[in-house]
Amino acid sequence: MARKSIHGEWSSRWIFILAATGSAVGLGNIWKFPYMAGENGGGAFVLIYLACIVLLGIPVMMAEVLIGRRGRQSPVNTMITIAKEEGANKHWVWLGWSGVVAGFLILSYYSVIAGWTLAYILESASGTFAGLDGDAVGEVFNTLIASPGQLIFWHSLFMLLTMIVVARGVKEGLEKAIRFLMPALFILLIIMVGYALSTDSFVKGLSFLFTPDFSKITAEGILKAMGQAFFTLSLGMGAIMIYGSYMPHDASIARTSFTVAMADTGVALLAGIAIFPIVFANGLEPGAGPGLVFVTLPIAFGQMPGGVFFGTVFFVLLTFAAWSSSISLIEPFVAWLVENKGMTRNHASILSGIITWVVGLGTVFSFNLWSDVKIFDKTFFDLLDFLTSNIMLPLGGLLIGIFAAWIIKQQSSIEELGMGDGPAYQIWSLLVRYVTPIGVGLIFLKSVGAI
Ligand code: PHE
């Protein structure tokens, strides 16, 4: 298969791992995972989440990379090309489009939250958090989200940053930066775990995260754990597919997917281990919602030696992590604009940036002006998040798995995965053929009360 991507190729398998980890590790690990775990009872949620990573996430990631590398185009065109090649229904192209829509919707709110991290760089650097207790940090956070003006400012800045990198091309854009920022983030998280160890609630925090109490989890909690697994691995919308389309042909899909999933899970668990002891030591609520990280970590920064430095560096690194995720959210659409509309990357990223920015205003207002406006009992932000993470991504992932395992001929997938047709291939095939569709299907049914 000699197809080549017109957008270029990663220079090695390591660069793919770096880029895919850059996409996977982001706000989902450090902001979302802890508050989701906190809201859904802790241990049982974490266990289901981990099971979903292993049984659904890794196999679907392999499927996504496989399809991407075979098609070597934007997900929309890849779906058209491969469906034609394999003699499948042409409507599979809609899978590509639903990914594009999901990417826009996710980025629209992702950028608003990334804006909080930008704002927190400034707060940390100016010493706002020094010596503050939980209530006072809560005040800082509430004042920020109550101000549409501030949120719009930071959201705009983050979108601008995203557009700049996307315009330059993902390969040039962040590649160099991610190389050392990712390990730095990892080290800083370990320092935070060290701080958490010094509180008197370390064991309590750990046992909240790792002792499963299934009476605390609801059907919706299970759905959310599954959604979180897809979200955190960037699966189900084409981000990993397009990164796969830039992957060199000789790289092992299984090994790289596994590495990315492990790194991503490691970061999420470290974040949880750092945060919950601080939550309990300060008498805060684990179920505090989206503000959890933004009201707990600053307490630690305000108390620890060198806190201004560590706090500032932490939020800078978190911004980079969010940045390297955000570009992968619009890359599928940008690549399509370049392929089909002959646009330059500059124009394509400006256009996508503007659309996303406008939709993002809905999320901005959902924290203040529209906080009382509820659809299905959810604010605009909650609704977007629910729709994308818990429905669109798992559904997209399920269909990607079905496409890779049932539509693409076995001979082709064996050739593309390059690990022979032995037990490793058989296990993958079993997981995407049966376990993913049945697993996702059962969780969907359970969450609507049908079983
Ligand atoms: N995985 C990213 C995170 O955890 C978010 C993301 C989702 C990125 C879907 C791309 C696609 O922050």
Image (spheres, rainbow, N blue to C red):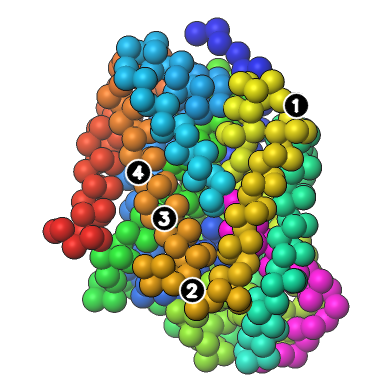
| N-terminal-most mark, 2 or 3 | 2
Determine the image quadrant of residue 150.
bottom right
Question: Mark 2 against mark 4, which lies toward the viewer?
Answer: 2
| N-terminal-most mark, 4 or 1 | 1
Q: Is residue 263 left or right of residue 204?
A: right
C-beta proximity under 8 Å, tags 2 and 3: no
C-beta proximity under 8 Å, tags 1 and 2: no
**Residue with the mark numbered 2:** 373
Q: Amino acid at mark 1?
A: Thr
**Residue with the mark numbered 1:** 344
Q: Which mark is residue 110?
A: none
Q: Is residue 115 magenta?
A: yes
Mark 4 element type: helix
**Residue with the mark numbered 4:** 395
- Give how far across and how far down residue 201 sits, in percent: 51, 85
Residue toward you, 269 or 39: 39
Asked if disc 4 is less than 8 Å from ligand 1, the answer is no
102 lies above or below 112: above
Q: Residue furthest top?
A: 2
> Which residues lie in the magenta part?
107-133
* Residue 121 visible in the shown view: yes
Q: Amino acid at mark 2?
A: Val
| N-terminal-most mark, 3 or 1 | 1
Question: Mark 1 against mark 2, which lies toward the viewer?
Answer: 2
Mark 2 element type: loop
Q: Amino acid at mark 4?
A: Leu
- Give how far across and how far down residue 187 sits, in percent: 68, 60
Q: Which mark is residue 387?
A: 3
